[in-house]
Image (cartoon, grey):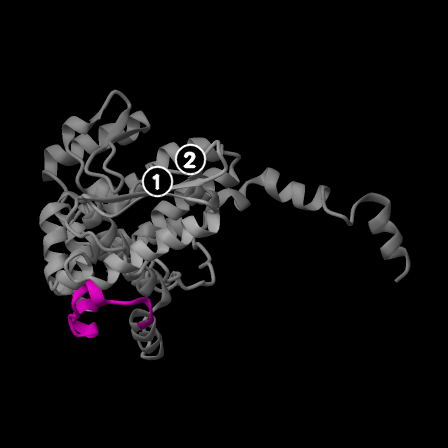
Amino acid sequence: MIKPLPDGRWHVDIEPVKGQRHRKTLATKAEAKRFESLMRVKYLKNPEWNQSAKDKRHLEDLINRWFLLHGQTLSDGLRRKQSMLGVCSRLGNPVAARLSGQVYTEFRSNALSAGSAGKTLNNQLGYLRAMYNELARLGEITYPNPLSSVRMLKLQERELSYLTTEQIPQLFKSIRNTCELPHAELVAIICLSTGCRWGEARSLTPDRVKSGQVTFVNTKSKRARSVPISKELSARIHRHFNAYGLFTRCEPAFDKALKRSGIKLPRGQSTHVLRHTFASHFMMNGGNILTLQKILGHATVTMTMRYAHLAPDHLREAIGLGPLTGNVLADIFSTD
């Protein structure tokens, strides 16, 4: 830290490494800055104090350490670990402290050329950066995050698909004709009724369906949330549990029924289209964006805003508040 003194001089107080503090008062600010830079360079060049030079652990070691200290507490921690280990292997498992932004961007460029999806590469970069940051927070590493300067790829936002009012009965007809087990149909109904994720619906138990609402736990955000449902749906869920027991893994049955229905969806969307369908129809029917955020369980409204353009008021404003309104538009048309 550099700060001015009442007598016009400048005081430097820096701690390049923990436990090594230096203070000095100099005549000018420029001299103070030079002293600060000199001391930082001195420690960077000295292997006794340069922690990145001393830390010889490879990236795989850090990934495993991160998972032990933090990753296993995350709902998707194991998936993140496997994703990072895949990147680690393709990078040749370098010394973690020596990984640089240049090395990583070259790897990413080659991965893009080989056909890797941009979103996948952004996810991997996010996981690795978060890993370094978390280990630094825990005091496990003392050097700067080597990937902090690497920017995410700018991707074209993917259009959210949803089922129309004509496609919904088409899908359920296919489910009834395709699925041998009864679970897929009711899980799909719960998703369409509450906007929940498929896994959240499938993990429901009888004690979480009561008082006119369902309560989802073990969610992606780690926060339990409750969503109201109709009496008819509540009764049907309990009848189902009494007759067939808890839901079992039925995603493959849904995927098969979706394929047979003839409904075409963008790549990577299957059960998640039910959540998009709830959110899209909620907004098209005049729902409030903040209410939708709570129903979906989004930590911030940013993610929920993807559905805002479907609101009727939003569409009306596009027509009524744009520059081509009233007499202006009439004048333009009159010149045809």
Task: Choose between 56 and 159: the one closer to the eye.
Answer: 56
Q: Earlier in the sequence, mark 2 or mark 1?
A: 1
**Can you say which quadrant of the picture contains the C terminus?**
bottom right
Of residues 240 and 114, the one drawn nearer to the viewer in this rendering? 114
186 and 158: which is toward the camera:
158
204 within the magenta span:
no
Q: Residues within 10 Å of mark 2 (few under 14, many from 20)?
A: many
Q: Residue at x 82, y 43 (%)?
A: 326
Q: Amino acid at mark 2?
A: Leu
Mark 2–mark 1 contact, CB under 8 Å? yes
Q: Is residue 324 above or below residue 230?
A: below
Q: Which residue is mark 2?
A: 292
Where does the N terminus fall, quadrant-wise?
Answer: top left
Image vertical order of residue 307 relative to residue 263, above or below: above
* Magenta span of residues: 87-102
**Residue 329: percent from the left, percent from the top?**
82, 50
In-image side of 120 versus 97 (left or right): right
